[in-house]
Amino acid sequence: MSTTPTPATATPLLSPARTLATAARVLRQLSHDPRTIALLLLIPVLMITLLRYVFDGTPRTFDAIGASLLGIFPLITMFLVTSIATLRERTSGTLERLLAMPLGKGDLIAGYALAFGGVAIVQSLLATAVSVWALGLDVIGSPWLLLLVALLDALLGTALGLFVSAFAASEFQAVQFMPAVIFPQLLLCGLFVARDRMAPGLEAISNVLPMSYAVDGMNEVLGHTDITGDFVRDVLIVAGCALLVLALGAATLRRRTA
Amino acid sequence: MMNYPGAAVEARGLTVVRGDRTVLRAIDFTVEPGRITGLLGPSGCGKSTLMRAVVGTQAKVTGALDVLGSPAGHPTLRPRIGYVTQDPSVYTDLTVRQNLDYFAAILRPGRRQRDARRAAVTRAITEVDLTSHADALAGTLSGGQLARASLAVALLGTPELLVLDEPTVGLDPVLRHDLWNLFHRLAAEHGTTLLVSSHVMDEAERCHRLLLMREGEILADGTPDALRTAARAATVEEAFLHLVDQAATRQEPTR
């Protein structure tokens, strides 16, 4: 640590204490809203249960789609929650207040990522546990690896949500970014049709979309006992994308606004 | 405590453009340290923009603007300025104390300063008279209470400069009186410089110095007494109206 923290020091981009305080504040806000917590935690479980009985006659299909969905749920919910939360921060004036204070932009971004990453862990734990133990999702690899991919997906969702909230002037617009940003990835990620069987142009596009690698990673765990090279690649790509988009999100936070 | 020469705020040719509108037109003014300077003028005259420029959150600012000895918006100024926006900016889904705890942690981070933080939070809550509502969700407070919660955040770090955008709007007369007493106490006891905007002219009498604004320009600058005497008016409001008339007749021939 440096010398005495005089009040006249410049703001560092990231300070652990301010980041933790921000994460704690975001969780505290959430704790005053039990219904949102319940929805966050229960909807993935209910949907995966629904899926199980939709594919009642074809358990192999449930395995493939179920594992993919375990990765997609945290991405979608964290995207929605983060984009609305940051939009509220922008419109309520608290963002302006924070940026007029000695808060680094990185503190805010990392604080949100930490808080929602934590929520995503609980959400994924619940959904994965129910899928594997109660619904008979057949995973050859370790369920912990499923959890790891789910967590990275949640971070990616948080990052994307932070980023697009800069382009939304209202909640209406923010919610519309869900179909705009998530749906194309959902269609192209290999959930509905294997990616190599799509039109060649679409396969090329799917190769640059992060959700494709999230789903690939889930399928690697599904089919292999060990950590495969492809799995490592998938995980690194999803993590890299999340970090990249978080950095882009930080760039959209302006201390001076019109 | 004050390590800057002369004025707490000094503007020369300050111009702000928002969209295609020039909101501040090359204005000059100074704010004396340790005094309460009132920024008065009708809605939409540029008061909030001027304050945002001083705090350093306004984009497209040209001209010279020095605050506490540094250019406005300089990172070292952030912990030294308290700023209250016109709309209360606190988290409505946190209690008053939780709001203050968070903002205090931004100003004084780290476990070692926990006691100092706690003391600052309690003091700020007491100063704005919200002790009985400290554990109420901000979203359930009345408009005036919410405004005071927002003010409390600005008082947390014992700032050298307090920039308050219409802090008394919607408050009852007793609360307004109490807050003005608090402002005077801050200036007298801590040497805090206050820049307070208002469109209620009777609050002008409580300021040490006044800046009268209209349509992005400073009409007059001086103590309430001096302004009244110069305009041979009984109140600042009359003086202001007189100055507006004068400005209008001066402009007439050029149009």
Image (cartoon, rainbow, N blue to C red):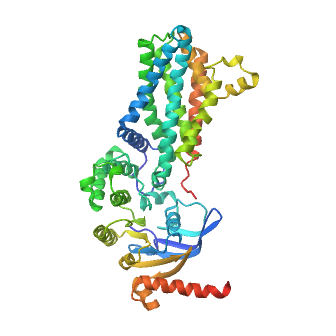
Farthest residue to the left: give it: B132
Single out the residue that lies furthest toward the bottom: B232
Is residue A60 in view from this perspective? Answer: yes
Question: How many numbered discs, if any?
Answer: 0
Foreground: A4 or B183? B183
Does the rendering let one see residue A227? no
Q: Quadrant of the C terminus of chain B?
A: bottom right
Q: Quadrant of the N terminus of chain B?
A: bottom left
In front of the other: B200 or A111? B200
Q: Position of residue A208 (x, y in %)?
A: 67, 28
Relative placement, left or right, of B30 versus A38 is: right
Q: Nearer the viewer, residue B210 or B116?
A: B210
Relative to residue A63, is residue A14 depicted above or below?
Answer: below
Q: Is residue B113 above or below residue A41?
A: below
Residue at 59%, 41% (x, y): give it.
Answer: A248
The x, y position of residue B5, in whole percent, is 46, 73
Give whichever of B38, A109 is nearer the camera.
B38
Q: Position of residue B191 (x, y in %)?
A: 35, 70
* Quarter holding residue A232: top right
Asked if A53 appears above or below A254 in the picture, the reply is above
> Residue at 26% across / 59% down in the picture?
B126
Q: Is residue B167 above or below residue B234?
A: above
Q: Position of residue B224 (x, y in %)?
A: 40, 83
